[in-house]
Amino acid sequence: MENSKSIERFAKTVEEATAEALKILNVTEDAVKITILDEGAKGILGIGSRPAKVRVDLKPDPIEEVKSFLREVTLAMGLTVNVEASQKEKHLYINLTGENMGILIGKRGQTLDALQYITNLAVGRHSDLQMGVVIDTENYRRRRRDTLEGLARTISRKVRDKRQSVKLEPMTRFERHVIHTILQNDRYVKTFSEGNEPYRHVVIAPK
């Protein structure tokens, strides 16, 4: 059985059969899964001898696995999307494009966050991808971050001037993280989260 992703080879030894398969596939051993189908036998004076047999399968590209997963999930939602991926440090950034992307964003990005969560869960269980997946569409996360930054600055000034804590509306984990990050070095206010999901919110309080 042979195709572009799998090949079987016979040789005197398992090592020789594996080396031949790797050469044909033009890959290194870390890019494949090797299955020994028969360790072979030397026999006695050539009688009863048989060659070793291995099957070498190319490991799936983890990034392509993520893209394929997202296409399947969004198709189940009735959407046809284009999936673009780029790597930066320890994250894989996914940008989804297509029609009706507002459906993927949902209220305050909750649908987008849910999609990102299940993607990371699926990747963690079934893929060799050793990085977190960040999903965006129509530059929502950047636009939302800009909005939250303006909100955080405005409320922090109010807290500083009146010396009274302010509770923000319930937010997703991503949104709360943005608020905490923006104000983490503020000399006059501090932030912390209260409540249980999905009603967990940020409190901005005077130091």
Image: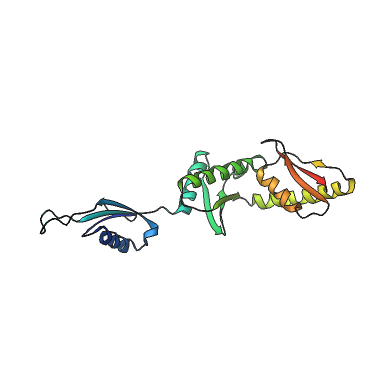
Left/right placement of residue 59 relative to residue 206 reads: left
- Residue at the extreme front: 44
Give 1 or 84, whichever is nearer the viewer: 1
In this rendering, the answer to whether 60 lies above or below 25 is above
Give 207 or 141, whichever is nearer the viewer: 207
Residue under the image location 50 percent in, 44 percent down: 122
Q: Where does the image place residue 120, in percent across and percent down from the top left?
A: 54, 46
Left/right placement of residue 167 relative to residue 113 reads: right
Residue under the image location 70 percent in, 38 percent down: 200
Regarding residue 2, the answer to whether it shows in the image is no
Regarding residue 165, the answer to whether it shows in the image is yes
Q: Where does the image place residue 159, in percent across and percent down from the top left?
A: 85, 46
Give 30 or 2, whichever is nearer the viewer: 30
Q: Give the total number of marks visible in the rendering.
A: 0
Q: Where does the image place residue 63, in percent across and percent down from the top left?
A: 48, 53
By what rule are the colours in the image chosen? rainbow
Residue under the image location 50 percent in, 39 percent down: 76
Residue under the image location 89 percent in, 45 percent down: 162
Left/right placement of residue 37 relative to residue 106 reads: left
Left/right placement of residue 168 relative to residue 159 reads: left
